[in-house]
Amino acid sequence: MENPAKPASITKQVLILLFGGLILSAGSCAGFLGTSTGSNPIAFVFAIGFATGVVMMFGAVVWAVIRALSGD
């Protein structure tokens, strides 16, 4: 007999997204502030990284709220 698949923990997934987004945003913010003087093209890459991290954190919160409201 096979064991039924255990459902994945939503809490763990949300926390990974939340902290991953926080780390990406913090690192990108530091990189942007360090390279923003003058006309350094890498500053744009850090700005994109910061925005991506913020979107990840926002997505994790929205995902958690939707799952909580749906009763899963």
Image (cartoon, rainbow, N blue to C red):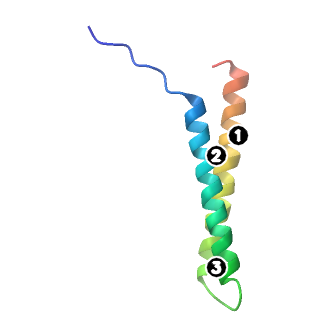
In the image, residue 14 sits, relative to residue 33, either above or below, namely: above
Residue 26, relative to residue 40: is it above or below?
above
Amino acid carrying mark 2 in the image: Leu
Locate residue 57, reporting x and y percent: 67, 48
Q: Earlier in the sequence, mark 1 or mark 3?
A: 3
- The answer to whether 1 is drawn above or below residue 17 in the figure is above
Disc number for residue 61: 1
Q: Any mark on residue 18, and which?
A: 2
- Distance from the alpha carbon under mark 3 to that under mark 2: 24 Å
Q: Which residue is mark 3?
A: 43
Whole-angstrom CA distance, mark 1 to mark 3, is 27 Å
Q: Are marks 2 and 1 in contact (CB under 8 Å)?
A: yes
Q: Amino acid at mark 1?
A: Val
**What is the C-alpha distance between the residues marked 2 and 1?**
8 Å
Residue pictured at 68% horizontal, 18% vertical: 71
Tell me the quarter of the image containing the C terminus.
top right
- Give the structural element (helix, strand or loop) at label 3: helix
Residue 62: image location, x then y, percent: 71, 38
Dot placed on the residue nearer the N-terminal end, 3 or 2:
2
- Badge 1: how crowded within 10 Å, few (<14), some, or many (20+)? some
Secondary structure under tag 1 reads helix
Residue 40 pos. (x, y %): 63, 87
Residue at 33 percent across and 13 percent down: it is 3
Count of residue discs: 3
User: Residue reaching furthest top?
Assistant: 1
